[in-house]
Amino acid sequence: MGEKPDRKPCAPPCADRRTTKPGHGTQLLERRNRVLHSVRTTRLSWFATLVAAVVVMGISNAGELAADTASDRFREQILEAERLHNLDRHRELQRLLEELEGEAHSLIGRALNREERAEILWRRARAEFIALELRYRAGELNSDSLEEGIDTVIDRAEEARKLDPAAAEPRFWHAAAVALRAKEEGRLRALRSMRDVRDLIGEALERDAELADAHFLMGRLYRELPGRPLSWGSDRAAVSSARRAVELHERARERGRDQEDAGDEAPVFHAFYLSLAENLLNRGWDARERGERRAELLREYRRAESELDRAAAYEATLDLPDISDREEAARLVERALEQLSDAVSYRSGRRGAAGAKRSLRNELDYRHARELQERLR
């Protein structure tokens, strides 16, 4: 057999297709490192962004929670202020409102906002006005003390109005203070003041049509003021406004009963019912006239363009008992005397059968009821 031919040694793989350049491996390594670094950086960037977002959300949620907690604490203080108001504990009420205004950081954990400051101011104006009016009715104030007190009420109400222009109460308590001052003014000056009072109450009712105190005051002023052309007094409007005030007062008492933490039962403010009784006595319609006048009143109610004018014809929307004004007034006075006689016969702080407590307000209302009782005889 012949010998096999010699084979040539194999060349390095692919030596004929690719040639390795000097430093090529180093470049590949650097490129790979750059890619890996970019990936790691991107991942870290996303992670950092995610962490930052979580932190920001946490801070935001914590801020919202703190704000909610502060608002809840503020409302708790206001509920306590309303309880003291209902109990005629004016000195304690003033101390609470002064502390809330001056030490908000320690009581609720932050400074008060504009609306909260306004609410404290008008509540202080209300407390000062009520204490002032009760002492005035009791004959305990001279004219200088009355004037000084009225100025304080008006200043607080005006400051509250500037802080919260949408609030109804600052305008109303300003109006109430001006109306009280008018009792000590000359006739002509008082009549001019009453125009301002009516405007302020009208503005308050456009902001809150269910402000019972505003309807109560309008009912009293309609009764006390002369009619046109001298002023805007009206026996018919006096009765309608007083009815609206009584209805809203009774709704507020129902809401008070429904509150789980109400504590003491929502009080009866007898002045609302006695004012309606006096307005009915002054108007003096019999049962037939009450029915016949309803259609006329209803037309006025439907034509009214303001809350003030609607309230002046509000009686047309109600189903009245088929009795005279005098009979209805007698029933209101009898009920008030029954409840108030218990209140004024008990020592201060002791509860009577009607759930009322002895106070200057109740004693003055009792006197008013006795005066109306004499008129009914």
Image (tube, grey):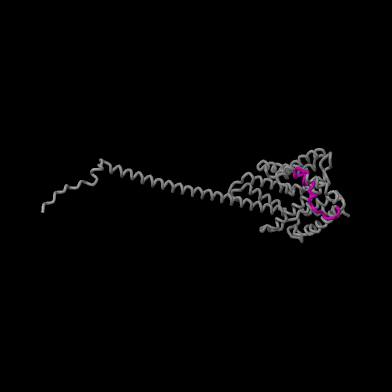
From the top left corner, tell me how far across and down residue 367 is, in percent: 82, 53
The structure residue drawn at horizontal position 39% and vertical position 45%, both measured from the top left corner, is: 41
- The answer to whether residue 304 is magenta is yes
Task: Please name whichever residue, 6 or 374, is drawn nearer the observer in this view of the structure.
Answer: 6
Image side of residue 230 versus residue 154, left or right = right
Name which quarter of the figure residue 174 lies in: top right
From the top left corner, tell me how far across and down residue 61 is, in percent: 54, 50
Task: Please name whichever residue, 342 or 78, is drawn nearer the observer in this view of the structure.
Answer: 78
- Split into 4 quadrants, where in the image is the N terminus? bottom left
- The answer to whether residue 11 is magenta is no
The image shows a total of numbered marks equal to 0
What is the residue that sits farthest to the front in this orientation? 1
- Start-end of magenta stretch: 303-324
- Split into 4 quadrants, where in the image is the C terminus? bottom right
Name which quarter of the figure residue 204 lies in: top right
Q: Is residue 34 something one can see in this rendering? A: yes
Q: Is residue 131 something one can see in this rendering? A: no
Task: Please name whichever residue, 321 or 119, is drawn nearer the observer in this view of the structure.
Answer: 321
